Amino acid sequence: MHPDLLLRNAQQNSTLAGRLTLRMSDNLHQLRCFGCGQRIRGDQAGPNFRCADCGDLFEVEYPGWHHVGGTDRPNSGALKWLWRERRLSQERLDQSGVWRFREMFPILNDFNQAVTLREGNTPLYHLSLAARSLGLDALFAKHQGMNPTGSFKDTGMTAALSVARERGFEWVACASTGNTSAAMAAYAARAGMRSLVLIPQGKIAWGKLSQAMDYGAVTCQLETDFDGCVRVLTRIVEEAPIYLLNSVNPYRLEGQKTPALEIAEAMDWNVPDHILVPGGNLANSSALGKGFREMKELGLIHRLPRITVIQAEGAAPLARSFAANGGRVLEPVEAQTRATAIRIGNPASWRKAAQVIHETGGWCLDVTEGEIAVAKAELGREGIGSEPASAVTLAGLKKLAADGRVAASDSVVLLLTGHTLKDADYTIDFHRGTLLTEAECAPVAAAIEPLRRNALAVEATPEAVLGALRAVVENPIAVARN
Ligand code: F0G
């Protein structure tokens, strides 16, 4: 029997299931302006998803949840039971690690129309080597790069693109540093919709560009940066009937809440002491914070983890803002980093992310190009590949552990956001020793040398290969340097 039916029976038969209401086809949301608090219906938002009065972003809210005992407020015990039952279900939506939690984001009139690639359900890996070297008991990586298109963007895209389809749009669009465009193009293709991608010329990793092309997006490379692409697209959606799927679209964040649910569920509805997230446009940290906040509000968890955002030094407007004024005012920067996914100087969701950091007691830090490269190779050494933007989390954790903000007994989850094959050039350049400048390399040179693994050119005989093997065992660092 389908878990939803089971639950309905349980509800009728047992007071234990309580007042959980699962009206699958209900759309229970409204939008609230993050700046001035104005509330509108979901279909009243303008094409750029900015408040007509104050220009700030919207946030999805579910008014029924506030009425404790009301029929629209889900029951936490019953939800936990239902979500676990769904893991055994063969239903399309239940097999998605996003839609399995659909009671947490009733944004569609008909859930059955959701566009899914079976996203979510990503692994939570124990990082034993990194834990040992940092002296931590419990260090995990939630690997969102294990999603269908290789990044965390899939969890938000399945939600927002489903809204676009339900509202009758034929075209969707985004400006992107690569991963959003790959995700959008894939989900649009699955839905039979058309997609337009704007990317900064020469500043995205090839793996991501190839995905947009493969999934049939109209892909325009503009001679500007990500922030310039956003400016152009904002004008386009005002003139053409194209649905904007950048993370200013609040429905993206609703799907991106679900890794928070997965983490809590995996920890038996406890939460870790710390979550570290890379920061670019700052939607993901906002979404995770919203996820934990709402779980607490509904009684699914009893406290919040500290959420800390890590940025690359050359693209760190929020880290600078926290250092200068506690995150109250943000000066955009001209962004520069090899972690191209987070090369963003004017992040749209910075106010939401700053609120999450304040509310949870987290921090915002930046890390250098050298620190990112070392952290990525260290993750790789324990079998966990990731793209450079993800590795900022481990680099940031080292700083927090060194200055005592993370204690040995604290539990920590790093959010890894993208798959290692998204940017294979970066990895190869690192191991060849051509990635960093001398100045970038110098402060981390001692850490880099033992991590480098060059491909060896060896004659095609067993003796030559065995000879090479012997040389590596005897002097690994010298061989890697060759
Ligand atoms: N990690 C990866 C791999 C990303 O692709 C991004 C953002 C981030 C971290 C930062 O997340 O923007 O929510 O703070 N990539 C966007 C894109 C901007 O277009 O693919 P954020």
Image (spheres, rainbow, N blue to C red):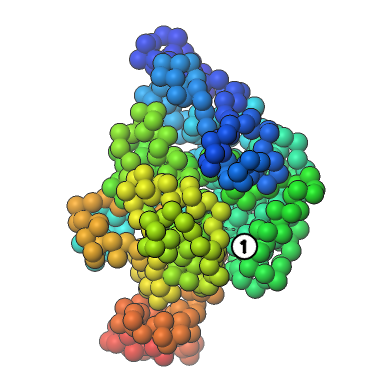
Q: Is residue 479 above or below residue 395?
A: below
| SS under mark 1 | helix
The residue at 25%/57% (across/down) is: 405
- Spot occupied by residue 29 in the image (x, y as percentages of width and height): 57, 29
- Spot occupied by residue 428 in the image (x, y as percentages of width and height): 50, 77
Using the image as rendered, state which of residue 455 and residue 355 is in the foreground. 355
Q: Is residue 73 left or right of residue 198?
A: left
Quarter of the image with the C terminus is bottom left
- Spot occupied by residue 455 in the image (x, y as percentages of width and height): 46, 82
The residue at 19%/56% (across/down) is: 408
Number of other residues with Cα within 10 Å of mark 1, as a class: few under 14, some 14 to 19, many 20 or more: many
Q: Is residue 16 left or right of residue 425?
A: left
Q: Amino acid at mark 1?
A: Asp
Q: Is mark 1 within 8 Å of ligand 1?
A: no
- Reading the image, the residue beneath label 1 is 227
Inspect this view and state whether residue 234 appears: yes
Quadrant in which residue 367 is drawn: bottom left
Quadrant in which residue 381 is drawn: bottom left
- Spot occupied by residue 141 in the image (x, y as percentages of width and height): 37, 55
Using the image as rendered, state which of residue 219 and residue 296 is in the foreground. 296
The residue at 62%/64% (across/down) is: 226
Q: Is residue 316 above or below residue 253?
A: below
Inspect this view and state whether residue 416 appears: no
Count the labels in the image: 1
The residue at 60%/55% (across/down) is: 180
Using the image as rendered, state which of residue 186 and residue 370 is in the foreground. 370
Using the image as rendered, state which of residue 128 and residue 30 is in the foreground. 30
Q: Which residue is outermost to the top? A: 13
Q: Is residue 293 left or right of residue 196?
A: left
